[in-house]
C-alpha cells in the first residue's frame, strides 16, 4: 500500500453498534473513526489547530501506541531494546484478517524484528468489543517491554468527563465512586499480584454534563494491573488504557518469543451508566458455561459456624439442618486438611486431617449426598504455611527476593506459580482431591498479596505477575475441562480477585467477607454495576456481621442474599424450629424466583444508604415476572411516618401485573404502590406476574 491509496476502513459489528477503524494516511497506525449506531463514517481527520508543536501521531486517536511512534503522549507499549535503544515505528503489513466480527491488523517495526498485531473480536450476541495485542520478537536480540498494555480506547466525550469506578478494601469491596476529570488523568490498579480490593478493573465514562452517551472499559486480568483515563486539555478524545501493572511487570521477549496481552473489553450505550450495566451483564452471561441453575446452587458453607474446628460428626449434623433448609450443596471450608487447626499451619498439605477425617472425606461426602445435597470443599492452592510438609520439602517454591527474609501475611507464603513444577504440583493436588471423594464444588481462595515477587537469575523472572495469572487461569481451565461437573467459586479473602477473566473461568464469586446485611447491600450494589447477579455469591449468616454489626431481620438478610446466588453460612444448630421453617420457606421462594434474578436485568431504586432502597429484576422473556426486593434501613422511622411507596421502573409496556400483596393490577407508568412489608418488617420481596392474555401494544 502507498500513502496515496484510499484509506482502508474496517467495521466491526456488535449487537447494536458498529466500531469502525482505519489506517492513518501514512499507514503507520490504526485510528478510531466511529463507535456507535451503525453509520457511514469518513476516516478520522484531526483539525490541524490541535496538532500544534507535536507529531500528529501524538494527537491521533491511535488504537494502540508505542514509544517511538508517540513521543509526547501516553503510549501503551514501552520497548527497551538494550544499549539505550527504545521504542518502535510501525508499518502495516498485508496479511491482515477482517470480517464483521474479527479484525487482526499486523505491523512491522522499522528494524524488521518486531511484529505487532492488534486483535479485535465482537459478537452479534452482545455489545462488547474485545481487544488484545500480540508482539513477536523475530530478531536475534532480546527486548524488554517495560509496559505491555492491552489497548487504547478513544472515547469522544470531550475534555470534561465523569468517571464512575468501584473502590474498596477488605470487607468493603466494590463501593461506587464518581470522579470528574478535566484535563487530568485518573489511574487505578492493583499491585497485589491479584485483582485486589482497592479497585475493580472496570470504568464507566460519560461527559460530565451529558451522561447519556456512556462507555464502559474493563480489563480481563486477575493479577497486578493498571487502568488510566486521560481527559485532554483540548480535543475530543478521552483515552482509556490498561494492562498488567508496569510496577510489577517487565516482560522479556527473547528471540522467537511472543507476548500476548490480556483482553480489554469495551461497551457503549446511549442509556448512560444504566445502559452500560446492562451491556456488561449481557456480555458476561455469554461467559457463563451454562445458563441453568446447576452451577449456581444454594450453598450451605460451614465456615462461619465452625471456622477451623471441623469435626466430621458436627459437620454431618450441620448438613442435616442445611438439607432441611433446602441447600443444594454442603461446602466444608478451611480446616479440613492435615494439621489445620488454626491459620498458622497446614496450607500446602492437601490431604484430609487424619484426626478429623480418619477415613478421608468420602464418609462425610456420602452422608451429605445421602441427604440429597452435593458435597464441596475449600482450597487455597497458591499458598503455603512455613509449618507444612510442603514448605519443608520445597522451601524454594515461594516468591522470595534474593537474601531477604520472606514475608508472611496471615502466616503464609505465596507459591511461585511461574515455576512449571509448582503448577504441575497444583494440578496434581486438584486431580487427586477431586478423585478422592464425590466432590462437585470447589471454593478456590487466595488470602494474601504477593510480596517480593520475582525469580532472580531467570530472564523471565520479572514477569512473575503475568506468569502467576496465566498459571492460575490454566488451572481453572483444567478444572473446567477435566472436572466439568465441579462448580468453582472464586474467592480471595472475599472479593479481592474478581474480573472478567475470573468470571470466564468460574461459576460464582464470593463477593466479600462482609456479611453484615446493610454493608453487604452497598457492596452488592456496586458489584451489580459491573457484574451480574448470576455470579454474586451471597450468604445469610448469623448476626453480627464482620464490620457492619447492626441488626436486621432474618427476612432482610435473606432478601439481601436473594439479590444474587443465595447461600447460607449461619450456625444452623443455633436456629430454632421456627427459624428453620421460616428459612426453608425463604429458600423455596428464592428457588422459585432465581431464574428472574439470574437471567433477568437489574434496575436500582436509589442507593443502599437511602432510607428505602430497592432492586427490581425484570425477568427474561420466558419468565416475564418482575421481582422487587425492597429494603428499609430504619424500621422505627417507618413506623412513625408515611408508608413506603414505590413505582416499578422496568415493567413491560402495555402489560398489567398482579401481585397477591395488593388488589389492583400494576402497570408501567401507573401510580406507585404502598410496600406492604409482608415478607419482614424491614424488607419486602414482591413478585409481579403478568396477567394472562395481555398483548404488547
Ligand atoms: C477467606 C474467605 O473469604 C472466607 O470465606 C473463608 O473461606 C476463609 N478465607 C477461610 O480461611
Image (cartoon, rainbow, N blue to C red):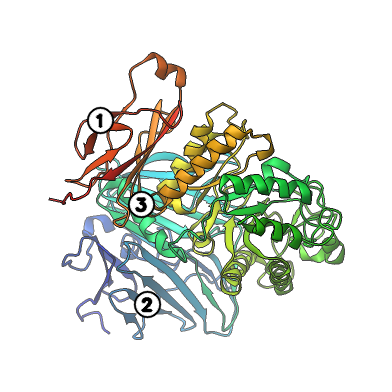
Q: CA distance from mark 1 to mark 3?
A: 22 Å
For this orientation, the residue located farthest to the top is 640
N-terminal label among 1 and 2:
2
Residue on which disc 1 sits: 672
Label number found at residue 183: none
| Residue at image location 62% in from the left, 65% down from the top | 472
Q: Quadrant of residue 481?
A: bottom right
N-terminal label among 3 and 2:
2
Number of marks in the image?
3
* Residue 283 visible, this angle: yes
Q: Relative to 106, is 167 above or below?
A: above
Q: Relative to 77, is 239 above or below?
A: above
Q: CA distance from mark 1 to mark 2?
A: 52 Å
Picture coordinates of residue 260, whole percent (x, y): 51, 72
Label pair 1/3, CB-CB below 8 angstroms = no
* Residue 83 visible, this angle: no
Amino acid at each position: 500500500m502507498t500513502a496515496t491509496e484510499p484509506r482502508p476502513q474496517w467495521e466491526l459489528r456488535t449487537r447494536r453498534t458498529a466500531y469502525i477503524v482505519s489506517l492513518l494516511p501514512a499507514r503507520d497506525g490504526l485510528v478510531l473513526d466511529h463507535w456507535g449506531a451503525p453509520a457511514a463514517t469518513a476516516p478520522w481527520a484531526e483539525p490541524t489547530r490541535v496538532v500544534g508543536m507535536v507529531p500528529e501521531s501524538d494527537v491521533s486517536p491511535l488504537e494502540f501506541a508505542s514509544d517511538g511512534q508517540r513521543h509526547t503522549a501516553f503510549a501503551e507499549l514501552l520497548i527497551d531494546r538494550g544499549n539505550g535503544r527504545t521504542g518502535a515505528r510501525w508499518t502495516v503489513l498485508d496479511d491482515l484478517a477482517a470480517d464483521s466480527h474479527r479484525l487482526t491488523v499486523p505491523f512491522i517495526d522499522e528494524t524488521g524484528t518486531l511484529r505487532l498485531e492488534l486483535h479485535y473480536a465482537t459478537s452479534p450476541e452482545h455489545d462488547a468489543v474485545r481487544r488484545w495485542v500480540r508482539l513477536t520478537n523475530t530478531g536475534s536480540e532480546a527486548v524488554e517491554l517495560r509496559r505491555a498494555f492491552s489497548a487504547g480506547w478513544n472515547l469522544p466525550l470531550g475534555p470534561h468527563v465523569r468517571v464512575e469506578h468501584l473502590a474498596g478494601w477488605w470487607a468493603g469491596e466494590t463501593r461506587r465512586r464518581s470522579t470528574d476529570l478535566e484535563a487530568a488523568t485518573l489511574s487505578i490498579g492493583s499491585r497485589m499480584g491479584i485483582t485486589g480490593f482497592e479497585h475493580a478493573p472496570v470504568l464507566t465514562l460519560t461527559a460530565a454534563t451529558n451522561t447519556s452517551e456512556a462507555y464502559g472499559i474493563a480489563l480481563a486480568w486477575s493479577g497486578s494491573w493498571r487502568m488510566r483515563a486521560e481527559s485532554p486539555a483540548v480535543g475530543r478524545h478521552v483515552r482509556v488504557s490498561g494492562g498488567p501493572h508496569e510496577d510489577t511487570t517487565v516482560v522479556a521477549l527473547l528471540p522467537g518469543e511472543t507476548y500476548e496481552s490480556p483482553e480489554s473489553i469495551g461497551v457503549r450505550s446511549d442509556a448512560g451508566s444504566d445502559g452500560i450495566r446492562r451491556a456488561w451483564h449481557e456480555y458476561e452471561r455469554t461467559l457463563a458455561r451454562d445458563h441453568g441453575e446447576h452451577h449456581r446452587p444454594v450453598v450451605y458453607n460451614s465456615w462461619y459456624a465452625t471456622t477451623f474446628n471441623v469435626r466430621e460428626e458436627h459437620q454431618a449434623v450441620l448438613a442435616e439442618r442445611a438439607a432441611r433448609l433446602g441447600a443444594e450443596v454442603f461446602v466444608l471450608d478451611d480446616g479440613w486438611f492435615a494439621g489445620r487447626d488454626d491459620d498458622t499451619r497446614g496450607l500446602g498439605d492437601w490431604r484430609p486431617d487424619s484426626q478429623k477425617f480418619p477415613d478421608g472425606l468420602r464418609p462425610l461426602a456420602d452422608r451429605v449426598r445421602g441427604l440429597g445435597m452435593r458435597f464441596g470443599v475449600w482450597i487455597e492452592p497458591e499458598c503455603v504455611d512455613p509449618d507444612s510438609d510442603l514448605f519443608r520439602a520445597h522451601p524454594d517454591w515461594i516468591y522470595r527476593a534474593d537474601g531477604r527474609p520472606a514475608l508472611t501475611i496471615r502466616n503464609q507464603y505465596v507459591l511461585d506459580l511461574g515455576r512449571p513444577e509448582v503448577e504441575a504440583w497444583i494440578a496434581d493436588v486438584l486431580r487427586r482431591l477431586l478423585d478422592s471423594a464425590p466432590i462437585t464444588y470447589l471454593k478456590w481462595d487466595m488470602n494474601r498479596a504477593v510480596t517480593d515477587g520475582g525469580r532472580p537469575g531467570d530472564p523471565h523472572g520479572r514477569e512473575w505477575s503475568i506468569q502467576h495469572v496465566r498459571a492460575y487461569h490454566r488451572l481453572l481451565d483444567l478444572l473446567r475441562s477435566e472436572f466439568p461437573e465441579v462448580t468453582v467459586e472464586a474467592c480471595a479473602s472475599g472479593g479481592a480477585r474478581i474480573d472478567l477473566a475470573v468470571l470466564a473461568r468460574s461459576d460464582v464469586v464470593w463477593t466479600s467477607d462482609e456479611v453484615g446485611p446493610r454493608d453487604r447491600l452497598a457492596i452488592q450494589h456496586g458489584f451489580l454495576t459491573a457484574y451480574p447477579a448470576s455470579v454474586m455469591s451471597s450468604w445469610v449468616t448469623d448476626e453480627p456481621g464482620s464490620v457492619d454489626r447492626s441488626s436486621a431481620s432474618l427476612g432482610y438478610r435473606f432478601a439481601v442474599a436473594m439479590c444474587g446466588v443465595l447461600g447460607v453460612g449461619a450456625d444452623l444448630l443455633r436456629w430454632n424450629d421456627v427459624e428453620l421453617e421460616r428459612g426453608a420457606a425463604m429458600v423455596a421462594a428464592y428457588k422459585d424466583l432465581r431464574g428472574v434474578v439470574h437471567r433477568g436485568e437489574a434496575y436500582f431504586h436509589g442507593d443502599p444508604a437511602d432510607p428505602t432502597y430497592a432492586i427490581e429484576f425484570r425477568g427474561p422473556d420466558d419468565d416475564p415476572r418482575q421481582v422487587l426486593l425492597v429494603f428499609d434501613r430504619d424500621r422505627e422511622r417507618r413506623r412513625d411516618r408515611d408508608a413506603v411507596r414505590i413505582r416499578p421502573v422496568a415493567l413491560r409496556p402495555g402489560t398489567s401485573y398482579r401481585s397477591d400483596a395488593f388488589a389492583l393490577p400494576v402497570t408501567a407508568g401507573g401510580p406507585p404502590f404502598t410496600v406492604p412489608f409482608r415478607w419482614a418488617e424491614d424488607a419486602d420481596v414482591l413478585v409481579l406476574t403478568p396477567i394472562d392474555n395481555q398483548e404488547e401494544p
